[in-house]
């Protein structure tokens, strides 16, 4: 499985980084919410206030890095925003109903996780 990170380089510019998930990983979360996105909503460049994992539930969203690269993400695709400094990223939502699952992370550091979410007693 691959997911996309949006990271900030030493120059303050954001870029995409595709990451292979070799094993189950876990992040400590401090907030989880389902976020409806208004039809066609856009946002100028902005950094995230905290490391954030976002997954598209319905619709799609386009993310643009400060370097100008744009990618579209659809249902089931995850993005890990680690650009908490620098110029950040911009986004545009689809002209159809979109919902994101937003998970604000404690620190953005992935840790190995058990592969079985429900271990036997």
Image: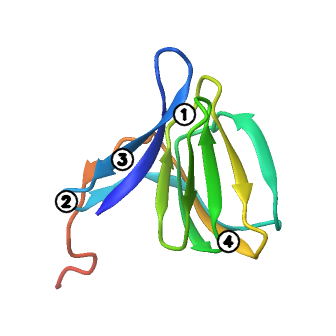
Tag 4 secondary structure = strand
Q: What percent of the width, then of the height, locates residue 16?
A: 46, 40
Tag 1–tag 4 contact (CB < 8 Å)? no
Give the residue at the far front of this rendering: 69
Q: Residue at x 59, y 25 (%)?
A: 85
Tag 2 secondary structure = loop
- Quarter of the image for residue 99 reads bottom right
Report crowding for label 4: few under 14, some 14 to 19, many 20 or more residues within 10 A (C-alpha). Answer: many
Q: In the figure, is residue 80 to the left or right of 102?
A: left
Q: Residue at x 26, y 81 (%)?
A: 118
Which residue in the structure is indicated by mark 2? 23
Depth check, mark 3 against mark 1: the one in front is 3
Q: What percent of the width, then of the height, locates residue 38?
A: 82, 65
Tag 3 secondary structure = strand
Label placed on residue 99: 4
Q: Earlier in the sequence, mark 3 or mark 1?
A: 3
Depth check, mark 3 against mark 2: the one in front is 3
Q: Height in image: 47 above or below 42?
A: above
Q: Residue at x 58, y 39 (%)?
A: 50
Which residue in the structure is indicated by mark 3? 18
Which residue in the structure is indicated by mark 1? 83
Report crowding for label 3: few under 14, some 14 to 19, many 20 or more residues within 10 A (C-alpha). Answer: few
Q: Height in image: 72 above or below 88?
A: below
Report crowding for label 2: few under 14, some 14 to 19, many 20 or more residues within 10 A (C-alpha). Answer: few
Report crowding for label 1: few under 14, some 14 to 19, many 20 or more residues within 10 A (C-alpha). Answer: many
- Point out the image quarter for the C terminus: bottom left
Q: Height in image: 74 above or below 112?
A: below
Q: Earlier in the sequence, mark 3 or mark 2?
A: 3
Q: In the figure, is residue 93 to the left or right of 31?
A: right
Tag 3–tag 1 contact (CB < 8 Å)? no
């Amino acid at each position: 499985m691959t997911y996309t990170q949006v990271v900030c380089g030493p120059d303050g510019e954001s870029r995409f980084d595709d990451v292979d998930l070799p094993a189950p990983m876990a992040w400590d979360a401090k907030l989880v919410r389902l976020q409806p996105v208004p039809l066609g909503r856009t946002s100028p460049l902005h950094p995230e206030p905290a490391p954030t994992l976002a997954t598209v539930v319905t619709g799609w969203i386009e993310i643009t890095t400060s370097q100008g690269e744009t990618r579209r993400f659809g249902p089931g695709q995850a993005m890990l925003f680690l650009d908490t400094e620098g110029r950040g990223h911009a986004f545009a939502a689809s002209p159809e109903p979109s919902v994101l699952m937003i998970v604000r992370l404690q620190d953005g550091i992935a840790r190995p996780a058990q592969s079985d979410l429900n271990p036997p007693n």
